[in-house]
Image: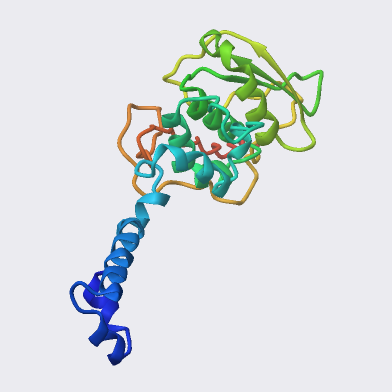
Amino acid sequence: MRRAAIERLLPAAYQRAAGPGSVLGALLDVMEALHAPDEAVLADVDALFAPYRTPDGFVAYLTRWVAMDHVIAAPRADAPLPLPVGRLRDLVAHGALLARWRGTPYGMRTALELATGVTGFVLDEPADRPFHVVVRVPPVAADQLAVITRIVEAEKPAAVTVEIVPGPARDPADPGPDPPGPGAVPLAPAATDDRPAPAEPDASPAAPGVASVRAVGRAHVPSPRTPSPAVEEPS
C-alpha cells in the first residue's frame, strides 16, 4: 500500500502532521516498505496453488490438499524429500484423477508411475489367493521401494493384502490394467457395473489401441480402458 493511500486513511489532523521530515511522515514510509512484500505475494497469489508455478518449498504442503502427503512421510519438516520436486508437482497436478481412481489397478499404477518416473509396474491377482495382489516392481525402480510401499498401502482397497516384489518390466505401449487370473477378485469395477468410467474432456489422438488423455500438467497419463461389453452367444 502506497504512502499516499495510507495517509488518506488517517484523520485530517494526522494528515496535516505527516508532512515531509516529520516523525509521522517517516513512519508512513516505513509502513509502505513493510506492506510491499505482502502485496507482491497477493498480486500473484494464484501461483501459490498452481502445481507447476508454486515455489519448491510449497509443493510438499500442496500434497496434503490432494491427500498425497503419504508419499512424503518425512519424520521432520527439514528432512529431504524422498523424490524429486518435479514428480511431486505431477502428483499434485493429477490429485483429482488419482482420488477418482483410488482402489483400482489403474489408480495404483498411475500413482506409482507419477511418483517414481518409471513405467512397467505389473499387478497380479493370484487365483489361489483371493483378495491378494502382487505388485511387481520394474528393476529400474528397485531403489524406490520405500516410496512404492507407502503408495501401494494407501491406494489398495482396505480388504486386500499386497505383496511387493521385483519383477520384469512391462511394455510401455500397453497402459491398460492387467487381466485378472481365473477366480481372482477384481480391483476395478466389473464389466457389469453401470457407472460410466470417468474420462478427461480434452482427449488427444493416440496410436491405435492405446487410449490417452491430454496431461493435466507436464506428465502424460494414459486414460483407463473401459470394460468391453459382454457378447452373448446365440442360443
Nearest to the observer: residue 5 or residue 71: 5
Name the residue: 40% across, 50% down: 48
Q: Is 82 above or below relative to 68?
A: above
Where is residue 45? Give x, y as percent: 36, 57
- Residue 19 appears in which quarter of the rendering? bottom left
Where is residue 61? Give x, y as percent: 53, 44
The N terminus - image quarter: bottom left
Q: Is 36 above or below relative to 86?
A: below
Query: How many tags in the picture?
Result: 0
Q: Is 149 above or below relative to 204?
A: above
161 relative position to 213: left or right: right
Where is residue 151? Give x, y as percent: 63, 30
Name the residue: 46% across, 43% down: 58
Where is residue 30? Give x, y as percent: 31, 64
234 relative position to 117: left or right: right
Nearest to the observer: residue 232 or residue 72: 72
